[in-house]
Amino acid sequence: METLVQPKTKQKIDLIDGKFTPSEASDIIKSILDAKINFHKIQRLSITEGNNIDPCEYDSSRINELINEQQIAKDFFAQARLQGKKLKMRSVIQIDIEE
C-alpha cells in the first residue's frame, strides 16, 4: 500500500532568535535591510535593462520605506547603546503557498 505524502503549503524560517548587544543587533538588522534594499534595486534595474527607450520611471517607495526603517533602527540601537542595554530579537519568516 502506497502512502500519499501531502505537499507542504507552509514554510517557517526562524531567522533571528537571541539576545544581542546593540552593536550586534544593529549589524544584523542593517545587513537584512541592505539585502532587501539591494533586492528591490536589482528588480527595478532588471525591468529596464536592455530597453534604451524606457524612461526609467519606477516606484521607489518600498526602497525609501526601507531606508527610513534603517534610520529608525539606527536611532533605536544608539539609544540602547547609550543606556547600556542588551536587546532580545526574534524574527520568523512565514511563507505560505497562495492558491
Image (cartoon, grey):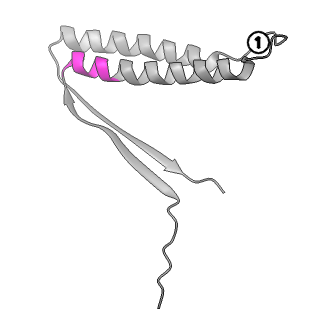
Q: Which residue is at a point 58% across and 54% down the rendered structure image?
A: 97
Percent position (x, y) of residue 81? 20, 11
Percent position (x, y) of residue 68? 50, 12
Residue 26 is a magenta residue: yes
Instruction: Looking at this view, name the residue that lies furthest to the left.
Output: 84
Instruction: Looking at this view, name the residue that lies furthest to the bottom.
Output: 1
Percent position (x, y) of residue 20? 20, 26
Percent position (x, y) of residue 77? 29, 14
Q: Which residue is at a point 76% across and 11% down the rendered structure image?
A: 56
**Left or right side of 93 for 19:** left
Q: Which residue is at a point 35% across and 9% down the rendered structure image?
A: 75
Residue 21, image quadrant: top left
**Residue 53 versus residue 86 in the image, above or below:** above
**Left or right side of 79 for 2:** right
Q: Nearer the viewer, residue 36 or 21?
A: 36
| Segment tinted magenta in the rendering | 21-28
Q: How many marks?
A: 1
**Residue 69 versus residue 93 in the image, above or below:** above
Q: Main secondary structure of the magenta part?
A: helix
Residue that numbered label 1 is attached to: 57
Q: Quadrant of the C terminus?
A: bottom right
Type of amino acid under label 1: Glu
Q: Nearer the viewer, residue 66 or 47?
A: 47
**Left or right side of 41 for 48:** right
Residue 73, image quadrant: top left
Residue 44, image quadrant: top right
Residue 76 is a magenta residue: no
Q: Which residue is at a point 70% across and 17% down the rendered structure image?
A: 59
Q: Secondary structure at mark 1?
A: loop
